[in-house]
Amino acid sequence: MTKSQKKDLVKILISAALFIIAELVPKAWPLFLVSYAIVGYGPIFSAVKNISRGQIFDENFLMTIATAGALALRQWDEAVAVMLFYAVGELFEDYAVNRSRNSIKDLMDIRPDYAVKLNDGTEETVDPYDVMPGDIIIVKPGEKVPLDGIVTEGTGTLDTSALTGESLPKDISPGMEITSGFVNLTGLLKIEVTAPFEESTVSKILDLVENSGSRKAKVEKFITRFARYYTPAVVFAAIALAIIPPLLFNGQWQDWIYRALLFLVISCPCALVISVPLAFFGGVGTASRNGILVKGSNYLEALANVEEIVFDKTGTITTGNFEVTDGCSPELLELAAHIESYSAHPISQSIIKAYGKEPDKNRIGKVEEIPGEGIWAEVDGRKYYAGNDKLMAKIGAALTDTSSPHTTVHIAAEDKYLGTIEIADVVKDNAREAISELKSLGVKKTVMLSGDTEEIAAEVSGKTGIDEYHGRLLPQDKVDLFEKMAEKADGHIAFVGDGINDAPTLARADVGIAMGGAGSQAAIEAADIAIMDDDISKIGRIIKIARKTITIAKENVVFALSIKFIVLILGALGFANMWMAVFADVGVAILAILNSMRMLIRHKN
Amino acid sequence: MKRSFKLENLCCANCAAKIEDKINKVDGVSASLSFMTQRLNLEAEDMDYAVAKAEEIINKVEPDCVLVK
């Protein structure tokens, strides 16, 4: 609780105590006035100040008029009760909004407070803003990585959960890129900084979360527009109610003015206006706790009604890492790993990885790369070749079976063909599950776009259960094809990519979702929603979060409006009292807040 | 040109909506104000003018609220 909140609480308690005494002791009505003054002077003072500035119809004014009217009607206890409840409601609202703000701040607690810079061998603790690219910083165990960079010395494990939601720690060693916001768990790391703090991942993410409120959902805009008409309309209705029946239909002035005062209390718009942004704030916060950054409420709204999802293949459905497919003999693999052992090419690396052991360098003699074709090397004193069709043709090795849609490496000894190793981009383990979950969530169509051959696209879509696939697409073709799909689609259409070469398509989609965001700032910038790790099942999760958010927002709106209208009708007919009117204002606001917090509490691990 | 500002002592959701609406009515300025994050995003050709106008409006609607530059 803040200082001013504590002060308000004390006022409320004193005022409430006096109110109870006044209720119990007969003829103690002056005590009501004292109790009223203690909680009421704040709002009354603000009301007077605001009227002098031409701001009428604000909450303070409405409450002041309503309670002053009640006092004039000698409804002492009701006047005090309304003011008291109004103060309690405001305090609670303030407290709850602050709490939900803080709970989101906690979960985005990735801002580093300092960086340890290395100056000619001496450590110096500085503000992260004062570190420049090229500087060397030191990160000790337990510390946050303050800036993006490349590890120059030391190995360790990193806790990436604040950014990615991934609980498994990540290993790091020299030469690897490191992202700010990770927490170093073990080992001392020396890092060469590559970007100033303003451009570091941490800054970008914080900026994005803090600005997410600025892209508003339709339902949010609707409710603020509604409030602009609602308050004046109810106030004029109140005036009409106070004047017309007594003048024209011989009504009791006292009775009708009391009903009009109820209208004034109910006319306060705050419960309505806060109910929706609060729900969306909870949704965006819950998403970030799951390692999913959402750039605005409007994207949650669009995603809740998504009907078609288009995926880029590489990096999204597949891991983007090449791996040797099953079905080649261990002897061939061992030989290939030795031929390729000095090559840094990704394909060579995948062969060595599949071999699983360190190639024995003593067995290897001369090695030479043949650009665009492959490599030859002396292994155990014999000359072997590894390469593509062209290389085999050149050395005169006859291939037996070459029909494969995947990347292939042929192995030959002198001019004798020995066999072929197939290398393919692997489908993510949980891709099939994730796609079927999307279908069960009501996504009507899933499509995959790929730059690879039709055969590979067909194979991957078959493995994952994706409805439709298109192969052989250049980045520009992907945008064009997506445009066509978007025009044809009735509902919202989302695009999921890794943000590396599909930024135009991400930007074009109703909702562009980028995966693997923790490593790529380009992805964070291009997308509307960035999934920080590359877990494809999070697409289903964010759709669920979006739907839950929309449900809560709608519940809040329907609930607030219907209670207000019911009490307005009861009030006009003479069946309501001040207590009900206060409930229709602050009571409803409090319930809307509690309803919105449901989301944050449920997803607290 | 776009800029983002923090607002301090912004205490009522409806006031936030009013401020946003009024700033948007200023010629050549578009604004988005989030009550939950207490951030005002302005987009305008003439940023100094937009900030001055925004401050004027904020001061009128909610005198306690301050725009932090």
Image (cartoon, coloured by chain):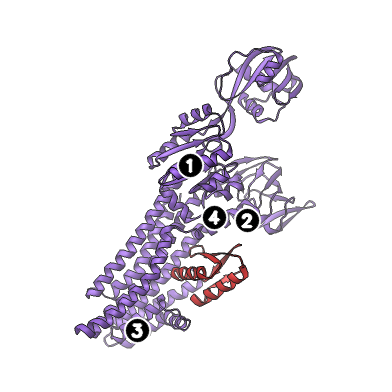
Q: Amino acid at mark 4?
A: Met
- Mark 1–mark 4 Cα distance, whole angstroms, equals 38 Å
Which sits earlier in the primary sequence, circle 2 or circle 3?
3
Sooner in the amino-acid sequence: mark 1 or mark 4: 4
Residue A251 appears anywhere in the view: no
A62 relative to A312 in the view: left or right: left
Q: Nearer the viewer, mark 3 or mark 1?
A: 1
The chain that appears red in the image is B
Q: Residue furthest left?
A: A250
Q: Is residue A487 visible?
A: yes
Which of pointers 2 and 1 lies earlier in the amino acid sequence? 2
Disc 1: which residue: A484
Task: Tell me if label 3 and label 4 are in contact, CB under 8 Å.
Answer: no
Query: Residue at position x 58%, y 70% from top?
Result: B50
Q: Residue at x 71, y 22 (%)?
A: A375
- Which badge, 3 or 1, is on the more N-terminal residue? 3
Q: Which mark is residue A108?
A: 4
For the residues tagged 3 and 1, is the chain the same?
Answer: yes
Q: CA distance from mark 4 to mark 2?
A: 11 Å
Which of these two is toward me, A293 or B55?
B55
SS of the residue under disc 2? loop
Mark 3 highlights which residue? A68
Under circle 4, the secondary element is loop
Point out the tag, 3 or 4, that comes first from the N-terminus: 3
